[in-house]
């Protein structure tokens, strides 16, 4: 177990602390998850306790059913930062291995929740379960929790957007269809991809549209191939896991993102590259974070480089028009969310 505190420190247990804990994997930290974490913060404030998010260092299915592990919406670093921005003081990441997967529910509640983390209250969604074969749940905590010092168990009802339940699965399906605007409604923010800039083939620069090629982790959900209107900012590395929670803010840059295999040039393999408008900088070795705002068109094969160049001009024009519309992030505006 590692507990990542908002001040940047890391511990292995919460010693002599009273904790209100939100339980779940929290992939995406979507609106449903946010409702849980808001409730955690509220209860912690009332009881003078620490608001804590308890999650896992990997998706539980990576141990329980490796062939069915879904692509992820957030990295551990992103989940921590999103939680901190919601008022959570610390994030406990449990190592989900065979030992944890086979631990009985009573031991999980008594040894981990009560003894190591000092949990006095629990907040979770209605379908959360824990312990070997998911044998433990909110009903167990309500019936037996008092003997371990867990006095209250609060269940947060599912949240619905457009009459459908908000869930990580729903968001993945929307992104696979390129419906990034609908995904944003469920997430409460644009879906984001982040990665270091790597060397590309230089074709974009040759056409007059230099691009930054992103190396996105293989376990990350990549939306449907196509061209997207995006905003971009430089991202903190965060790879060590000890990223400080600060007030670092950045101005947004706007851009056009392409996801696909470069069919005009008989490319092989998926690439993720972004052209940042009105910039001609070298971003190599930097890490960029891209927020996807609108799917513009599918990738397609053009008869010549000239035809492709004309289409990219149209994509840029459409992107500029999008970011002049009301309620859309404009270049020069400040992101209130911290760079990941």
Image: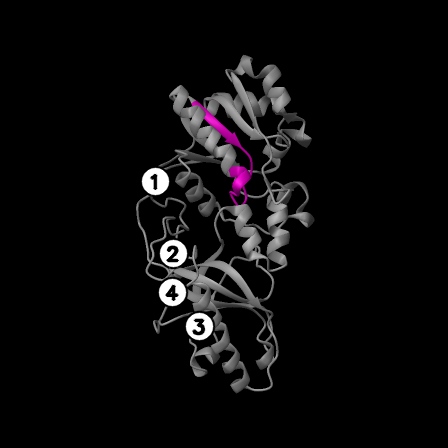
Picture quadrant of residue 264? bottom right
Find disc 2 in the rendering and name its residue: 235
The color scheme shown is: one colour
Q: CA distance from mark 4 to mark 1?
A: 24 Å
Q: Earlier in the sequence, mark 3 or mark 1?
A: 1
Find disc 1 in the rendering and name its residue: 8
Find disc 4 in the rendering and name its residue: 285
Q: Earlier in the sequence, mark 3 or mark 4?
A: 3
Q: Earlier in the sequence, mark 1 or mark 2?
A: 1
Q: Reply above or below: 140 against 297.
A: above
Find disc 3 in the rendering and name its residue: 211
* CB under 8 Å between discs 3 and 4: no
Residue 51 is situated, as x and y percent measured from the top left of the image, at: 42, 29
Q: Residue furthest front?
A: 326
Picture quadrant of residue 138? top right
Mark sitting on residue 106: none
Please tell me which residue lies in front, 223 or 31.
31
Residue stretch in magenta: 19-33
Q: Earlier in the sequence, mark 4 or mark 1?
A: 1
* CB under 8 Å between discs 4 and 1: no
Residue 245 is situated, as x and y percent measured from the top left of the image, at: 34, 43
């Amino acid at each position: 177990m590692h507990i990542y505190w908002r001040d940047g420190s890391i511990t292995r247990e919460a010693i002599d602390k009273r904790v209100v804990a939100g339980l779940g994997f929290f992939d995406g930290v979507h609106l449903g998850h946010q409702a849980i974490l808001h409730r955690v913060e509220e209860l912690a404030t009332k009881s003078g306790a620490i608001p804590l998010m308890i999650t896992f260092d990997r998706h539980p299915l990576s141990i329980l059913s490796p062939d069915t592990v879904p692509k992820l919406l957030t990295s551990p670093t992103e989940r921590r930062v999103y939680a901190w921005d919601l008022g959570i003081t610390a994030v406990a990441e449990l190592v989900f291995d065979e030992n944890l997967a086979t631990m009985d529910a009573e031991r999980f509640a008594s040894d981990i929740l009560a003894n190591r983390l000092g949990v006095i209250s629990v907040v979770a969604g209605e379908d959360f379960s824990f312990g070997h074969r998911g044998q433990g749940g909110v009903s167990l905590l309500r019936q037996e929790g008092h003997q371990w010092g867990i006095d209250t168990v609060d269940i947060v009802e599912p949240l619905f957007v457009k009459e459908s339940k908000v869930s990580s699965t729903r968001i993945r399906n929307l992104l696979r269809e390129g419906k990034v605007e609908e995904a944003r409604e469920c997430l409460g923010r644009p879906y984001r991809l982040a990665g270091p800039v790597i060397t590309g083939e230089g074709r974009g620069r040759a056409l007059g549209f230099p691009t930054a090629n992103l190396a996105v982790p293989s376990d990350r959900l990549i939306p449907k191939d196509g061209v997207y209107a995006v905003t971009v900012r430089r991202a903190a590395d965060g790879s060590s896991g000890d990223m400080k929670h600060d007030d670092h803010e950045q101005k947004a840059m706007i851009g056009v993102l392409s996801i696909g295999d470069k069919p005009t040039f008989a490319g092989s393999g998926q690439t993720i590259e972004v052209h940042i408008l009105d910039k001609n900088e070298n971003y190599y070795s930097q890490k960029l974070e891209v927020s996807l705002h609108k799917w513009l068109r599918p990738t397609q094969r053009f008869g010549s480089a000239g035809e492709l160049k004309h289409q990219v001009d149209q994509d840029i024009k459409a992107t500029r028009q999008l970011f002049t519309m009301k309620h859309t992030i404009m270049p020069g505006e400040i992101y209130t969310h911290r760079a990941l």
